[in-house]
Structures are given as C-alpha cells and as structure tokens.
Image (spheres, grey):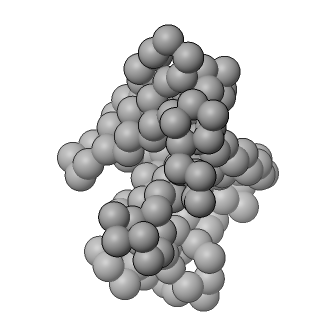
Amino acid sequence: MNYCSNCGNKCLPDASFCSSCGFSLQYEESYEDNNNKSFSHEFSSNILLGGNILTPDKIIINESGVTFIKRNKYLIGKDRVHISFKNIASVSVDRKLIDANIIISSKGFGEIIGKNFSISAAKKIEKLINENV
C-alpha cells in the first residue's frame, strides 16, 4: 500500500492521483525509482514503562515517512497516522526518568505524540527521522 507524500492518505498502488487531496503520484514513483534507499524500522512502546498491554503504540519508519499506530479510544480498532518526511517540521524527545515521549510535528496539520517508549528507542527514532528530513 502506498501513501500520498502530500497528505499521508493510503493510495492504491496503480493510482495516478491521491483520492484525498488530488496530488499527483506519478512524480513520487519516478523519485522513488531514482532513490534506491529502502528501509523499514518498527518501534513499540514499552509495556514495563506504562504502555498498553493489549496493543502497544507503534512507530514505523520507512522510505515513505513515519506511521504511528495506536489503539483507538473505543478499544475497537487502531488509529493510524502517516506523515511523509517532507511534511515533518520537527522531532523532539521528551525524556522522563525511565521512559520518553516522541513528539513529531508536521507542517500545518497536526502532530504525533508517542508515549512510553524506551529512551534508547526514542533517540533512534529521532536520529532516523532527522537523517531523512
């Protein structure tokens, strides 16, 4: 499944335009072909540090951007937020005594706040994002 680099919406692999914002996906494919960097890193909040036992929060970093997955407030499903690297304004780590929160701010339409991650995982997330922004 591809994501729109303009708004983060899920798009079909053969789509030419984003169904949410109308952004052209043709340029993205040619850009990705030239950029042979392919990677994927997944981080989960730590249950021992206060994370959810049933489904911990997850941050997935890959070549399309940052995806945050969290159990929704009704405990029925999961909410998913995706921010492409070109839309990330800043990333910071709010370090506490034994854990850390990751705050990823986007350019104009919200932010991701990942809670109860280990300090080492938070530093790795910050480093990976800063390398790709």
Extreme residue in the left direction? 108
Work out whether residue 10 or residue 55 is closer to the camera in this orientation and state it.
55
Quadrant of image for the N terminus: bottom right
Residue at 63% of width from left, 34% of height from top?
48
Q: In this image, 29 relative to 79: left or right?
A: right
Residue at 57% of width from left, 31% of height from top?
49
Residue at 31% of width from left, 44% of height from top?
111
Q: In this image, 38 relative to 20: left or right?
A: right
**Residue 125 seen anywhere in this rendered image of the structure:** no
Q: Which x, y percent locates residue 37?
A: 76, 47
Q: Does residue 37 lie above or below 54 as drawn?
A: above
Q: Which x, y percent locates residue 5?
A: 45, 60
Quarter of the rendering containing residue 55: bottom right
Q: Which x, y percent locates residue 109?
A: 24, 52
Q: Does residue 117 lie above or below 55 as drawn?
A: above
Extreme residue in the top direction? 97
Quarter of the rendering containing residue 106: top left
Looking at the rendered structure, the number of numbered marks drawn on it comes to 0
Work out whether residue 110 or residue 8 is closer to the camera in this orientation and state it.
110
**Residue 81 seen anywhere in this rendered image of the structure:** yes
Q: Which x, y percent locates residue 47?
A: 62, 41
